[in-house]
Amino acid sequence: MIVDMSIAVGGVRLRGPVMAASGTFGYGTEVPLLERRAVGAMVSKGIFLRPREGTPPPRIAETPSGMLNAIGLQGPGADALVRDYAPKWATWDFPVLVNINGESAAEYGELTARLDGVPGIAGFEINISCPNVEQGGLYFGNDPRAAAAVTEAVRRRTKLPVWVKLTPMVGDIGVIARAVEGAGADALCAINTFVGMSIDLNAYKPRLSFRTGGLSGPAIRPLAVHLAHQAARAVRIPVVGIGGISRAEDALEFLVAGCSAVQVGTATFVNPCAIAEVHDGIESFLHARGFKSLADLPRHLPRD
Amino acid sequence: MIVDMSIAVGGVRLRGPVMAASGTFGYGTEVPLLERRAVGAMVSKGIFLRPREGTPPPRIAETPSGMLNAIGLQGPGADALVRDYAPKWATWDFPVLVNINGESAAEYGELTARLDGVPGIAGFEINISCPNVEQGGLYFGNDPRAAAAVTEAVRRRTKLPVWVKLTPMVGDIGVIARAVEGAGADALCAINTFVGMSIDLNAYKPRLSFRTGGLSGPAIRPLAVHLAHQAARAVRIPVVGIGGISRAEDALEFLVAGCSAVQVGTATFVNPCAIAEVHDGIESFLHARGFKSLADLPRHLPRD
Amino acid sequence: MFVLGMRAPEIAASVRAGQFVNLGWAGGPLLRRPFSVYRAEGDVIEVVLKAVGVGTAQLLSMEPGDIVSCLGPLGRGFEISGSHVALISGGLGVAPMPLAARDAIAAGARVTWIHGARTADELCAEADGDEVVWATDDGSRGFHGTAVAAAPDVDLVLACGPNRMLAAAAERWPDAQVAVETYMGCGTGVCLGCAVPLARGGYDRACKEGPVYRAADIKWSMLPANLHYVA
Amino acid sequence: MFVLGMRAPEIAASVRAGQFVNLGWAGGPLLRRPFSVYRAEGDVIEVVLKAVGVGTAQLLSMEPGDIVSCLGPLGRGFEISGSHVALISGGLGVAPMPLAARDAIAAGARVTWIHGARTADELCAEADGDEVVWATDDGSRGFHGTAVAAAPDVDLVLACGPNRMLAAAAERWPDAQVAVETYMGCGTGVCLGCAVPLARGGYDRACKEGPVYRAADIKWSMLPANLHYVA
Ligand SMILES: Cc1cc2nc3c(=O)[nH]c(=O)nc-3n(C[C@H](O)[C@H](O)[C@H](O)COP(=O)(O)OP(=O)(O)OC[C@H]3O[C@@H](n4cnc5c(N)ncnc54)[C@H](O)[C@@H]3O)c2cc1C
Ligand SMILES: Cc1cc2nc3c(=O)[nH]c(=O)nc-3n(C[C@H](O)[C@H](O)[C@H](O)COP(=O)(O)OP(=O)(O)OC[C@H]3O[C@@H](n4cnc5c(N)ncnc54)[C@H](O)[C@@H]3O)c2cc1C
Ligand SMILES: Cc1cc2nc3c(=O)[nH]c(=O)nc-3n(C[C@H](O)[C@H](O)[C@H](O)COP(=O)(O)O)c2cc1C
Ligand SMILES: Cc1cc2nc3c(=O)[nH]c(=O)nc-3n(C[C@H](O)[C@H](O)[C@H](O)COP(=O)(O)O)c2cc1C
Ligand code: FES
Ligand code: FES
């Protein structure tokens, strides 16, 4: 099969369109049976400037075709990341982006400055699904000004590619997409998890200790395809589709809807070879339809 | 089993907390094997003032633990409803609310005036998940002013109970909930379907002729429980929980999260006896825990 | 093509040709799957199917004794009349025909069954009727051409198969009775998901007013042709 | 309690007592389900389970020849040492004990197995060890009280069972090795869903640093006690 699967997304060259989504692949050192050849890129677990403990258990709950998680962005902080992981990433044959988080635009900027130029770090994915502590806990992700401010704060500290990962919990995703495009994002990632809740009927309280959690998995795929499509229509920069991808057909839905590449998350928990299977399946699909390269796939839906 | 399952919700007395959701029970005359004793109330298929053809097929598509629909609010219009269905409803032993729709606040008001006082119509459920044609197609449902304007327009034309059915596609459901409470709603229904899209990879276009559709079914339940809980925390009027309920445990999640009653939608497609099974299951649960009445169920989660 | 039998005494006793059952089972997909009743004898009904997706694959991996929830009989079947009836089927469109043949014969009619396929491999093994005509697109068996072209002119034409075959039948016999295929949400008339576009404007429900229609009553250009019923 | 055997030669050859496998199967729930390896002989591993929810119910309805995807061996098992080892189990906490007994005996240790249950009905049928002690909450068989109370003082205590039983073991033997239960997303260390609160602060991953811990290293007050592993 000779299909050219490579693609450039927001300043990052990928050998294939299937990446590992943040928080579902650890720091890339844990996944067993990993078929590295198929990994387009990895986005590492979301990190803050300083170490974070994360939330008490229970942290996950299963729901129909999905799961809720409230990990609380547990992580070792920027210094440990630079010391323990980046040197390994520098030797790998696929790029690693760091998913960055903060409680204020300034903190995002500071974290970027700390990580910029560190060998092994190919770019940044800004997670704007964080509460904005300065604004009373409102989310950066559903306020176009706050989202743009965070993007600018990061953009000013680095020449590396900056991707912005959008939250689905918004009235109009196009507004946020345009705001962060204007603030200098090189690509958008759509989408992060939806906020959900599941109740323990024995205890009359939420199953998760954090009360709410982010819903991921196949359940959200139709919502994610719609939002990624809306984002792709709103901007000129590339959009990376995320949400409920476990088979090649799922990924192809995002690509046909206008995305340039995709990330696989929860599916890796179920099947450690999910990324390779999605990659290979896309290749077979393209081959069977006579496409010579990923770029030939009809990408944009007929507009209304 | 002697458990008092009755409850009053926003001016409507129900013999049980489980109602039929709009658009999933037709006009109440179609469902086979119906166990009427268990139906708390029925909300009829969404109606406009004038007849509507609806959208071309395909109108539905299955997704993991869910389905997308774009029926386009096909319906016979107010006059036919009054002539063909209301007289039947007037003889039934459970109340029927009419789900009302419009393209402008004025149209909602006109429809209410046409239906107010017609025997068989016990109240109104305002569907605010409609595009506001006067405002360039923005949804009433994610603009607090537009949502309040529609609620007021309906409120002014009737003394019957007015419920407002919220859309989940909003940045902050509490804002909309408070706006429509302030405009005179007697209860809130949370939630309507989420907008989603599914792609036909043979045709490189959406499966649904309308491109997007509303996602319903178990897949959305954790999102619906969260939003219903948020709405219930935001207002003093009762909230009716809707979204992915197919078993008693599902309904109980909404009740424990602060809802007063629930509606069952998609589950009726799969199991025409779903309402009765959910009702009976809640009764058994209450009985097994020693509760004498539905009102005794611990209703509000510990607040944070 | 495989045949699946289910004990369903009430349905077996009352089902009419062209009606369907809506099947659901534990561990299956969310929505039920509609299937025409293929045969009904004693306590048992049969459906004919092949694996096209997750639901049909699961049905075909069932073992004797497994339990399927079977809602039906649903929809409006064929209205049989006249002294010479032609049954025209394509692919899995054979499904409603054995019952149609039974009823037509019981009503004293002569029955000609014309079954079409792309190749001889796709022809179904058995057919009931006074006269059986095979038609293949590639001429590998019987008539070389479509089942519609192979059919004689008779009093009543009943047809089932891919929507594009039915559209062709509608051109030749406006009064033919055709069983159409749509996606279905409920099968019971409440969801309006199974819309069939009508020549006079508006939509009917395939599960309630259909799945059998007078051929000329359908606006064929708007009925999706790419569903999965028949390959 | 039922035992399910699976052909899994590589896992059978390498699994250590206290490690687990993460099982997934077609038509099953989204997430895999973790199970301790109960026995390993030749090409076959066994797990012990009872139906508590949808996943275990589906596993128990499998037929010989059905296929289960079996990821493992996962986690860190027991470290066996000393000349007298006590195995303390409650309910389904028997699961890792046969392998632990095997390894302890192979290491030349004397093994005392204390198994606790609420009533005699809940006791498992068989137990391996030089000495077997039963304990029931209601005194209907063996020692009247908990397994922890029934245990002798020995060189090494290995325990598995409800988290509240393990918390009691931790009070008596800070150096006991306990196998804890948490919900798991991946079982492979990437999701951080299986957080075990540590006495020194922060969290470990049950699937990677655990599921076996030194008893005193866990902050028991923060570990949920209401999971489903053991009724
Ligand atoms: C009245 C009627 C009678 C029929 N009789 C027969 C028969 O006798 N024999 C036979 O083999 N087939 C029959 N069919 C078709 C049969 O129901 C489909 O083959 C079956 O639903 C396919 O299911 P599947 O799970 O195998 O495929 P799927 O995997 O579900 O099909 C592929 C895709 O089709 C879509 N899809 C399938 N069913 C639906 C649905 N109900 N709603 C929305 N989307 C859907 C899904 O999105 C899916 O991705 C009949 C259909 C109708 C309407
Ligand atoms: C290391 C380890 C070893 C184990 N060994 C055994 C063993 O040997 N024998 C045994 O019987 N059991 C064992 N268990 C427990 C076993 O995994 C559970 O009994 C099983 O997951 C329950 O699955 P179920 O589908 O039957 O129940 P469910 O129906 O899934 O359980 C009820 C509820 O629990 C929740 N839940 C269950 N599993 C998860 C999960 N992974 N993540 C989030 N929520 C979840 C769901 O929300 C569900 O509503 C072990 C667990 C662990 C962590
Ligand atoms: C356990 C878990 C942890 C996650 N952690 C992060 C994170 O740290 N940063 C982030 O931006 N997204 C995080 N996500 C979101 C995923 O990257 C992805 O956007 C989401 O899960 C939807 O994709 P999926 O359905 O393929 O899982 C996490 C998701 C899961 C399930
Ligand atoms: C086929 C279909 C038609 C619907 N029509 C309407 C409608 O006319 N008006 C309305 O307010 N909601 C409508 N809904 C939304 C449902 O009433 C309900 O809010 C939603 O389906 C979520 O509940 P469920 O998951 O139990 O189905 C419709 C849903 C479906 C599936
Ligand atoms: S399938 Fe629901 S109305 Fe026909
Ligand atoms: S279960 Fe995912 S890290 Fe342990």
Image: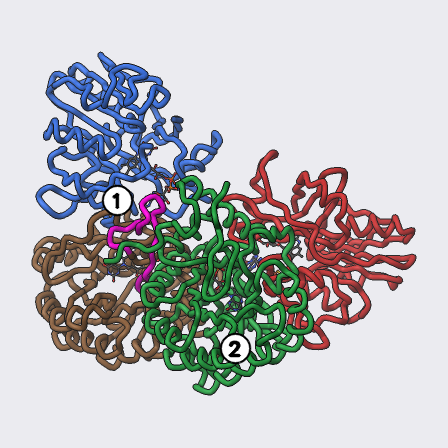
Chain colours: A brown, B green, C red, D blue
From the viewer's perspective, is residue D184 above or below residue D180?
A: below
Q: Is residue B150 left or right of residue A109?
A: right
Q: Nearer the viewer, mark 1 or mark 2?
A: 2
For disc 2, the marked residue is: B158
Q: Residue at x 50, y 40 (%)?
A: B1
Depth check: give the residue in front, D220 or B278: B278
Kind of residue at badge 1:
Thr
What secondary structure predominates along the stretch shown in magenta?
loop
Element class at badge 2: loop
From the viewer's perspective, is residue C37 above or below residue A99?
A: above
- Residue A65: image x %, image y %? 41, 52
Determine if the magenta segment contains residue A202: yes
Q: Chain of mark 2?
A: B
From the viewer's perspective, is residue B176 above or below residue B103?
A: above
For disc 1, the marked residue is: D188
Q: Residue at x 42, y 70 (%)?
A: B167
Element class at badge 1: loop
- Residue D77: image x %, image y %? 20, 32
Tell me the magenta residue range: A192-211
- Residue A200: image x %, image y %? 34, 47
Residue C129 shows which numbered tag?
none
Mark 1 and mark 2 on one chain: no
Depth check: give the residue in front, B184 or D36: B184
- Residue B186: image x %, image y %? 44, 70
The Cα atoms of the two marked residues, 1 and 2, are separated by 60 Å
Q: Is residue A201 left or right of residue D165?
A: right
Q: Is residue A165 left or right of residue B9?
A: left
Q: Chain of mark 1?
A: D
Q: Going by the picture, which residue comes out furthest to the top?
A: D130
Determine if the magenta segment contains residue A3: no
> Splitting the image into four quadrants, where does ligand 2 fall?
top left
